[in-house]
Image: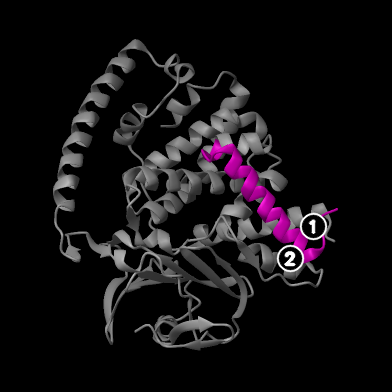
Amino acid sequence: MIDRSILKQALAESTLTKIRAIKNSKLPYIETDRAYDERIINLLQGPRMVSHITLRNQIRIGIIAAILACAILIMSISAVDSRRVKDQVNVYKNHIVINMQHNNSSNDEMKIYMPTFVPEGYELKAVFKDEKRTAITWFNGLTKINLSQKVIRNGFVDITTDKPGFEVIEMGELTLYYSDYYNFERSVIWIVDEYVFSIKSDTSVSRSDILKMVETMGEYKQSAPKDNPA
Amino acid sequence: MLSLYLSMLDSTEANKRLTEIYTENKDWMLRFANSLLEDENQAKDAVHNVFLKVIERLRKLPDKASDITEMFLYVAVKNTCINISKENKRIEYVSADAIANISSDENVEENAVTKDTYAQLLDFINSLPEIYSDILVLHYVCDLPLKEIAKMTGIPLMTVKTRYKRGKEAIIKGFGGIK
């Protein structure tokens, strides 16, 4: 039995730790300017808010909204065009789109994969699963590693490629999409058949350890991993 | 931008409070939103929407900028970014980066430690999917009723209730109850 005040303290500490990590990270700062002010006016919604805006600004909002509506329409048409491409992997300027079609196996039960290697000091703390996904977490103090697995039988995976620290790594038959994001978090995403895997951690876990986890992934049956999906 | 937000408030006191909240938190909120959305403009939209929520819920927050306000803003930024991502990408279109944050709403199988210590409770909370821990933070720490949480996050009330129930049940199962 835990005291409500202790629970409150633990919940607060957990969240404040995440906020401190953001504040202390090397995530880029974003400047705000006058153009930003004008751009966000059109996002104001609701009669109470509009009533505080002058008639002149309401007209400006209307004009901006009309321009935005046209822009959205043009972007939608472009998006539809890009989705007509049917190749399995489509490489664009800023992202890669992978088309996943695995209708034949739609009735199969989802297999669960886990690595045999986990960096020293990390302990398995939680496994969450349902019919289409699993999320596994290892902890070492306050740092954690998340392994996620999702079944996508008929859909797309969109991977952003123009972010800092992004690289494509070939590992045997696997293509890994690795990201070391502003010294804030590391993540790697890869696809095997109908499964999309992801490992995510902060930068206290090394790149080589994360890749070794990928390398040692195997099907999890009761207590022992078997059959590397690669 | 600040003057825009301030124009929506009625009293000087409210202006002062929003000024404090805005100036003290704007930078990290924008950086956090940008890390989730990977788009500066969308990050600015997200933070803007959060401040609209701050205005709406100003009376629910403490008098001065505080840790509780930061936690409220953290959860608000995250949920706003999730909502923006959903609007950007249609259902069949999955952002690979979002997959890293997958967690399930159903069939929760928690692997809770049983010793009743603060460190283990903290570990346990950190291992909970954030869809549960965020609701618990807003309810237990920020003292928001579930109905308010649903309004603030844009999550349906039934889903908020389910997440609250499952998060609480996980803690009760792991630690024997909450008194």
Dominant SS type (magenta): helix
Amino acid type, callout 1: Ile
Is the residue marked by circle 2 packed among few (<14), some (14-19), or many (20+) residues within 10 Å? many
Q: Is residue B154 magenta?
A: yes
Is the residue marked by circle 1 packed among few (<14), some (14-19), or many (20+) residues within 10 Å? some
> What percent of the width, then of the height, locates residue B81?
43, 47
Mark 2 lies on a secondary structure that is: helix
Picture quarter with the N terminus of chain B: top left
Q: How is the image coloured?
A: one colour
Check the image and report above or below for B50 versus B10.
Answer: below
Residue of label 2: B121
Examine the rendering and report whether any part of residue A116 can be seen: no
Q: Is residue B132 magenta?
A: no
State which region is magenta.
B152-179
Residue of label 1: A6
Examine the rendering and report whether any part of residue A154 can be seen: yes
Amino acid type, callout 2: Leu
